[in-house]
Amino acid sequence: MGVALGAALIALSAVLFIVQPMFRGLHASLEREDDEMTDTEARKRVALLALRDVEYDFLAGKLDEQDYRSLKGELTAEALAALEADESSKSLSAVGARGPDGIEAEIALARQRMFADMVACDACSFANEAESRFCSACGSALLSTAAG
């Protein structure tokens, strides 16, 4: 009897939790807010972030060149499709189709942003965090941060 009463109380609690927003008068808006990302914008962002991560993993030595080129090709195609879908959904006639050169420009811009606050090792050219005093790849002292 006690088990059945406990199960009934748990079930009642679950039902009350589910219907609580209706009693409070809360509702989900069917309109998209201006600051919300659309599906195509989210696809574009995810694809470009994945490209950035593959680039970083390759530079960090986590990927060999064959895997890097394979992943970069797949992700570039995905990013290009996402960019084209985003542009067509926004109906931007001024931008036009980006093509392979446009995606390479996006990758270059993402690379530039990613490594803007990095310090290159003089010995092995590995990109290290700006606060690093020693190279994460080879252990050499970073001269540019030691002087500053």
Image (tube, rainbow, N blue to C red):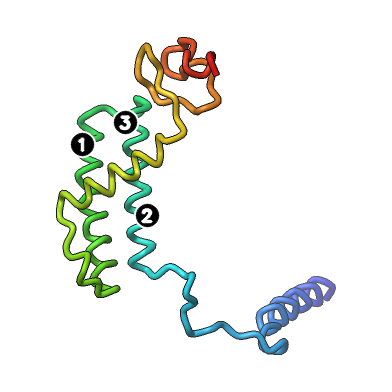
Q: Quick check: 34 left or right of 124?
A: right
**Residue at left offset 54%, top offset 14%:** 146
Q: Are marks 1 and 3 in contact (CB under 8 Å)?
A: no
Give the residue furthest to the front: 148
Secondary structure of residue under mark 1: helix
Percent of width and height locating residue 50: 35, 47
Label 1 sits on residue? 69
- Badge 3: how crowded within 10 Å, few (<14), some, or many (20+)? some
Q: Amino acid at mark 2?
A: Val
How many numbered circles are shown?
A: 3
As shown in the figure, which amino acid type bears the numbered disc 1?
Arg
Q: Residue at x 33, y 50 (%)?
A: 48
Residue where numbered disc 3 is placed = 58
Q: Is residue 92 above or below residue 21?
A: above
Give the amino acid type for the residue marked by disc 3 in the picture. Answer: Phe
Spatial CA distance of label 1 from label 3 is 10 Å
Q: Residue at x 71, y 89 (%)?
A: 23
Q: Is residue 93 above or below residue 131?
A: below
Determine whether, in the image, residue 11 is placed left or right of residue 78.
Answer: right
Mark 2 lies on a secondary structure that is helix
Q: Quadrant of residue 29?
A: bottom right
Secondary element under disc 3, as helix, strand or loop, is helix
Q: CA distance from mark 2 to mark 3?
A: 18 Å
Lower position in the chain sequence, tag 2 or tag 1: 2
Which badge, 2 or 3, is on the more N-terminal residue? Answer: 2
Q: Quadrant of residue 18?
A: bottom right
Numbered mark located on residue 101 in the image: none
Up/down of 131 relative to 70, above or below: above
Assign the C terminus to one quadrant of the image: top right
Q: According to the image, label 2 marks what residue?
A: 46
Toward the viewer: 79 or 25?
Answer: 79
The crowding category of the residue bearing disc 2, from other C-alpha atoms within 10 Å (few below 14, some 14 to 19, many at least 20), is some
